[in-house]
Amino acid sequence: MNEKRVAAGLKPLTMDNTLLDVARYKSNHMIQYNYFSHTNPDGTNWTNWLKTLGYKYTATAENIAYNSYDPVELFNQWWNSSGHRQNMMNPNYTKVGIGVLKGNGKYMGTQTFSN
């Protein structure tokens, strides 16, 4: 992702431990509770988790994807979707956390972005 950002004249994203934890938690949560959505079964989303952790941001986004065959292909799924690609290439985002986990016969991936 950072190679594509730099090639487009954007600054690379830095890995953020809190965003990493939230992304991993989201992927695990979707596997554990068998859903695929930005909205959790209880009606909350990743921003609620960030707020609970006291994370400060003015802009944030989340990409999610899954497949049953290749965790690396998750990136291509995001890249080939204009909305997901916009998140990855958004110049306002400076930080990212990525969580890819396997469970229930599939790879679940989450990217969480912020500034």
Image (spheres, rainbow, N blue to C red):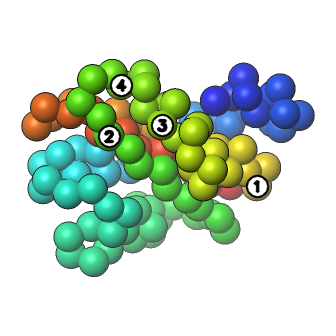
Marks 1 and 4: in contact by CB < 8 Å? Answer: no
Left or right: where 36 falls relative to 8? left
Tally the marks. Answer: 4
Tell me the residue at 34%/33% (across/down).
100
The residue to which callout 3 is attached is: 77
**Secondary element at tag 1:** loop
SS for callout 4: loop
Q: Given the image, on which type of amino acid does mark 3 rest?
A: Gln
State which tag comes first along the sequence, 1 or 2: 2
Q: Is residue 48 above or below residue 99?
A: below
Q: Quadrant of residue 69?
A: top left
Disc 1: which residue: 92
Amino acid carrying label 4: it is Pro
In space, the residues marked 3 and 4 are separated at their CA atoms by 10 Å
103 with respect to 27 (left or right): left
Q: CA distance from mark 4 to mark 1?
A: 27 Å
Residue 35 visible at all: yes
Work out which quarter of the rendered image holds the N terminus and state it: top right
Disc nearest the viewer among 3 and 4: 3
Which residue in the protein does label 4 denote? 71
The amino acid type of the residue labelled 1 equals Asn
Mark 3 and mark 4 lie on one chain; the one further toward the N terminus is 4
75 and 20: which is toward the camera: 75
Placement of 40 over or under 1, stated as above or below: below
Q: Answer with mark 3 or mark 1, whichever residue precedes in sequence.
A: 3
C-alpha span from label 2 to label 4 = 8 Å
Residue type highlighted by circle 2: Tyr
**Tag in front: 3 or 1:** 3
